[in-house]
Amino acid sequence: MRSLHSPVDLQTEAPAARDPDLQTIQQLRGQIRQVETGRRNDDGSIVSSGCQAVDELLPANGYNRGTIVEWISGRGSGSDFLSLLAAKNAAAEGGGVVIVDPRGEFYPPAARAIGLKLSNLIILRSSEQGPVQRLSPHQSQPLEAEDLCWAMDQSLRSPAIAAVWGTLPELDSAHEERTWLRRFQLSAESSGCLGLFNRSPRQSGSSWSEVQWQVTPQPSTNNQRRIHMKLARCQGGIAGQSIDLEVNMSTGNVQPHEPNRSKPAHSLPLAAQLANPAPRRRSARA
C-alpha cells in the first residue's frame, strides 16, 4: 500500500487538500462576524477586562464597545468587582457610567477606590428598596422594575454614556426578560455603549450578550479572593475556556491564580467590597 504514494506525494498533496477547507472556514467566520457587528455604532476600540489573562481568552483581546457582557453568579462571588473594573476602563477616555442598583447595595467609595469618578456616576435604584441615602449628585429617584429597565435602555442608547453596569432587576416573566434583553442589545449597538450586567443563575435562560461568563467562588482568604470564570458564551471565540483568578481585596489587583505564589505579609485595607450593606452604613456616618 505504501508504494502507491511516495512520501513526496503525501507532503505535496495533503496541504493542497486542506487549504481550501481552511480558507472557506475563515471566510465564513469573517462573514458571520460582519453580520454580527454590522449594526454596531462604535469606534472600534477595545475595553480591557482589567486582567490581561482574561483579555487573551477573548477574540478581540477585550470587550467590544456596543455589546453586552454578562457575569452569571451568586451574590458575593466577586463578579461585581470584575465587571466594575471593565466599566472603569470603558470610561477611561470619557463618558458617564450608569450604575443599576435594584437592591440598594452599591457602595460608591469602592468605586472611587478603583479609579471611578463619582461625579461621572448616575445611580438607578428600585422603589422596592424604600428610602435610600443620596450617595451621588446624579442619583435618580427609586424606580419600579419596568421603569428601571426603561431607564437602562435609554442609558444604553446615549452616546454620552460609556458603560451601563449593575444587576438586572427581577421581572415578572421570562418573556418580559427576553424582550428587555433584546432591546438592551440593540440599544448598545446603536450608541457604542458597553452593557456590563451581573445576573443570578435563575436569570440566565435568555441572553443576547456577546460574552457571558459563569463565575464560581473558590476557597479564599479575607484579603485574597479566588474566582473561577468559565466562558459560557463568546461570539467569534471559543466557549468553554476557563481561568482561575485572584483578586487582592487590599490593592484591587487581579491576576491568574498560581497555587505556589507567596502572599504578602502585610497590606492596607481598601474598599474593594461592592456589596456589604452593614459596613456601608457605618462608613456613611463616619
Image (spheres, rainbow, N blue to C red):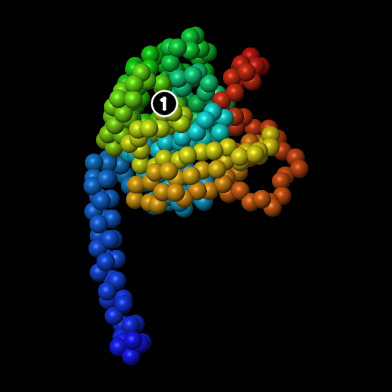
**Residue at the image point whose x is 28% and y is 29% from the top:** 183
Question: Which of the pair 181/174 is nearer the observer?
Answer: 174
Picture layout, residue 232 above or below residue 21: above
Q: Quadrant of residue 147?
A: top left
Quadrant occupied by the C terminus: top right
Q: Quadrant of residue 70?
A: top left
Q: Quadrant of residue 144?
A: top left
- The answer to whether 21 appears left or right of 209 in the picture is left
**Residue at the image point whose x is 72% and y is 44% from the top:** 264
Mark 1 residue crowding within 10 angstroms, few (<14) / some (14–19) / many (20+): many
Question: As drawn, which residue projects farthest toward the front?
Answer: 1
Question: Which of the pair 140/128 is nearer the observer?
Answer: 128
> Percent from the top left, x then y, of residue 193?
35, 35
Picture layout, residue 52 above or below residue 144: below
- The answer to whether 48 appears left or right of 286 in the picture is left
- The answer to whether 115 appears left or right of 263 in the picture is left
> Percent from the top left, x then y, of residue 192?
32, 38
Q: Amino acid at mark 1?
A: Leu
**Residue at the image point whose x is 28% and y is 61% from the top:** 25
> Percent from the top left, x then y, of residue 195?
38, 34
**Residue at the image point whose x is 57% and y is 45% from the top:** 245
Picture layout, residue 167 above or below residue 85: above
Element carrying mark 1: loop
> Percent from the top left, x then y, of residue 102?
45, 20
**Residue placed under numbered mark 1 in the picture:** 168
Whether residue 59 is visible to the viewer of this picture, yes or no, is yes
Question: Which of the pair 234/131 is nearer the observer?
Answer: 234
Question: As drawn, which residue projects farthest toward the top?
Answer: 131
Whether residue 165 is visible to the viewer of this picture, yes or no, is no
Question: As drawn, which residue projects farthest toward the right?
Answer: 265
Question: Which of the pair 74/116 is nearer the observer?
Answer: 74
